[in-house]
Structure formats: structure tokens, C-alpha cells
Image: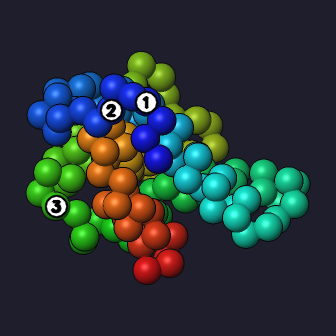
Amino acid sequence: MTLCQSLPMTETDARLLNPLKLAYMGDAVWELMVGTRLVLKGLSVRHIHKDAVAHVNAKAQAEALHRIIGRLTPAEEDIVRRGRNAHPHHAAPRNQELADYQAATALEALVGYLYLTGQEDRLNLLFEISQGEE
């Protein structure tokens, strides 16, 4: 799944990144993973889009984080904590609860960290658990 030749980063270098940068990367990776899963299900484009929107929002991502939280390593828990405590310079979207938005940012930071450090097997396992597929 690594799309960039300069990856993976060392875990130390990735931990030094601002958690919002990890979340930015994780948002893109999460959307790719959700979209890939839906395309492989053979759904129509309309249904892919509808289902993707339902899985790539703060509430759904907060629920996904809740499903995996007990399975994280101490290093992963630290990334999640840093992502949850990160303060973007904008408010949560109007239709999202602040707690869900913070949890979604935490999940995205974790996904970004795992992607950037080349931990694809771990990322795929946590994604499957988060989707109730384990």
C-alpha cells in the first residue's frame, strides 16, 4: 500500500510529526481504505459514495476508534492521545459533536502514523477490527 518511495519513515521520525500532520495523512489513507473496501464489494458508484460518506465522518470514525482502543500498543495509544488533544485552528463541523471530532482526529493520526511507518499489516488488522470484520 505504500505509494511513496521515501516511505517508510522511522517510528521516531513519525512520532516527531505534529499530530495534525499525521491526521491529515491518515484521513487520506482512511478514505482510500474505506473506498477500496466498498469497490471490492461490487457496489454501484452511487452506493459506494453513500456508504463512503457514512464511514468517513467524525461519528463513524469515533466508533471505529472505540472498537480498536483496547487492542492498541502503548506507542499507538500515545499517538491516539496526541491526536485527540491536538487543537486545529478551526471548530468542529456544525453537524459533528466535539468529542466525535476529537476521536476522529485521534484515529486519523494513528492511521497516518501506521501508514507513514510502513506498518501495513497492523494498519489492515486494526481497520478490519474497526469495521467489525475480525
- Asked if the residue at tag 1 contacts the one at tag 2, i.e. Cβ–Cβ closer than 8 Å, the answer is yes
- Dot 3: within a 10 Å radius of its alpha carbon, few (fewer than 14), some, or many (20 or more) residues? few
- Dot 2: within a 10 Å radius of its alpha carbon, few (fewer than 14), some, or many (20 or more) residues? few
Residue at 34%, 61% in the rendered image: 121
Please state the horizontal and vertical placement of residue 128, each as a whole percent of the image. 46, 70
The three-letter amino acid code for the residue at tag 1 is Cys
The three-letter amino acid code for the residue at tag 2 is Leu
Q: Secondary structure at mark 3?
A: loop
Residue at 87%, 60% in the rendered image: 44
Is 109 or 119 nearer to us in this picture? 119
Tell me the residue that label 3 is attached to: 73
Q: CA distance from mark 2 to mark 3?
A: 22 Å
Residue pushed farthest bottom? 134
Q: Secondary structure at mark 2?
A: loop
Q: Secondary structure at mark 1?
A: loop
How many numbered marks, from 0 up? 3
Tell me the residue that label 1 is attached to: 4
Q: In the picture, which quadrant includes the C terminus?
A: bottom left
Residue at 22%, 44% in the rendered image: 79
Vertical arrangement, residue 132 with respect to residue 21, above or below: below
Quarter of the image holding residue 38? Answer: bottom right
Q: CA distance from mark 2 to mark 1?
A: 6 Å
Residue at 39%, 36% in the rendered image: 23
Is 53 or 39 nearer to us in this picture? 39
Q: Is residue 100 left or right of residue 36?
A: left
Q: Is residue 112 left or right of residue 85?
A: right
The three-letter amino acid code for the residue at tag 3 is Thr
| Front label number (2 vs 3) | 2
| Residue 37 in view (yes/no) | yes
Tell me the residue that label 2 is attached to: 7
